[in-house]
Amino acid sequence: MRFREPVLAALLLGASLYPGSRIAGVSESLDIGTDAVPRTLNEWLAKGFSVRKASADQAFMDILQYCGDRAFYLDHGEKLVRMAGNATDLDPRFTYVYLFSGAMLMWQCNRTRDAVELLKKGIRNNPADKRLKLYLAAFTYYRLKDLGSQVRALEELTSLPDPPPMLYRILANVYLKQGKLGEAAKLWFVIAEHSDDWVDREWAKGKLAKYGLRRVR
Amino acid sequence: MLALAVRNRMTGLLALFSILLAGTSLVLTYLTPGTERRTFFDMAYLGLELLAVATPILASTSLQILEFDQRTCWLVLARPVTRPGYAAARFWGVVGATWLNILLASLVVLILVLPMGGSLDPFFLPVFASALLEAMIIGALACLATFVTTAYVTALVVMSGVVLLGYLSPTLSFLAEKAGNPAMAALIRLVYWILPHLSSYSVRDLAHPVETWYLAMLAGYSIAYTGAVLMAAVMVFRHREV
């Protein structure tokens, strides 16, 4: 009687060893996987306490704030490279960060090398993601000044599910550069009527107003 | 004991906190256009896990003040209720209150997800199940800590330490592999197996949703480990002066 509880406790602890080893092994194999050893205390804590996804979300919020700030235009997105690197180190499967930051670096900051490196990292970590490859193709055509191929790559990207609204803007600008006002107008109408972001909607409405375009009912 | 734990002011505050946390997840989505769903679920899952960890610890320590410092446990033990029965009731009271909180927070998450398209995230059910199981382990450990120590602050500090080490258990495993000295490696491995593997409950931070067999293994581990800790708690409580 005296030893019943310690013996039971030891037996139960022993019984927890098998499922304990199985779950520990699986959680390691399903790890989101970082290709970088934690460098900062924040990264180490995020890994240690399994809050990498939430920390990556917070890092993405910082990126968005920075991109909407005047500092972004003044330093030509210099900090964006590091910030995108941090966010994708925390969660290498956060594909939207590669897409958004890559596009900003390429088309807003003219930082071709950084944009391509970021996309390559994204493809390395997410080999099955089609959008990352198409972005890289669009970047390459942009660099080669092959506007036709760039447009084809961008058109393919906008036909995929949930394209980022920014992509419509980029494609509309390229159409305009090619003198295809009708094609650009179609996209402006899509943005003006369907975008969730009021900034995008106002931008598209401004463009339509500038060219005196109205939807024919 | 469940009614006592539910009536506890601390549990009520945590229930309110759980609703606020889920609501905050929705507010945060406005800061991440393009990844609203991801942000919402990441934050909501983090909140669920936080509830599973914080509620049993805070509910147990506040019950300790009520039962041992104010001596209300005398009334219960004089009924008579056996000490193992008292420990089991205390455990299920705290765990039951925590499960109710997790259920409430999950319902709020489900309601809030409706305007975002309504489809359920594949991580939702595994996260919900693992939060319930994690609450069991933390509840048992909190029960043990409040029986071992007489001061609730000490219980709080001890529990926080165990939870921190439990989350860092993969680091202990890594240290055991890297330890040059076999005796040191064996000691670290022993500590690793005694501590709860809390990082295994963070299924929300994995690359893919876990399968059913993983949850079955997690349930097996949780039941065995909780049982072991409860046995230790009963053993301590048998010899405790109240």
Image (cartoon, coloured by chain):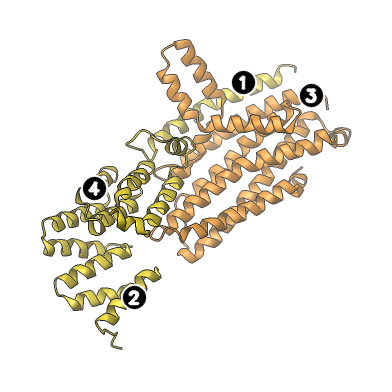
Chain colours: A yellow, B orange
Instruction: Name the image quarter holding residue B232.
Output: top right
Q: CA distance from mark 1 to mark 3?
A: 21 Å
From what the image shows, is residue A47 above or below residue A130?
Answer: above
Quadrant for the C terminus of chain A in the image: bottom left
Marks 1/2 in contact by CB < 8 Å: the verdict is: no
Q: Which residue is mark 3?
A: B240
Residue shown at 26%/84% (left/top)? A213
The mark found on residue A38 in the picture is none
Numbered disc 3: secondary structure: loop
Q: Which residue is mark 4?
A: A114
From what the image shows, is residue B72 above or below residue B169?
Answer: below
Numbered disc 1: secondary structure: helix
Q: Which residue is mark 1?
A: A10
Q: Which residue is mark 2?
A: A192
Residue shown at 24%/82% (left/top)? A211
Q: CA distance from mark 2 to mark 4?
A: 31 Å
Q: CA distance from mark 1 to mark 2?
A: 67 Å
Q: Is residue B211 visible?
A: no
Viewer-proximal residue, A112 or A22? A112
Amino acid type, callout 1: Ala
Q: Position of residue A121 (x, y in %)?
A: 26, 44
Viewer-proximal residue, A82 or B88? A82
Give the mark, 2 or 4, whose residue is nearer the N terminus.
Answer: 4
The answer to whether tags 2 and 4 share a subunit is yes
Marks 4/3 in contact by CB < 8 Å: the verdict is: no
Chain of the residue that carries numbered disc 3 in the rendered image: B
**As drawn, is A147 to the left or to the right of B52?**
left
- How crowded pointer 4 is (Cα within 10 Å; few <14, some 14-19, many 20+) is rated as some
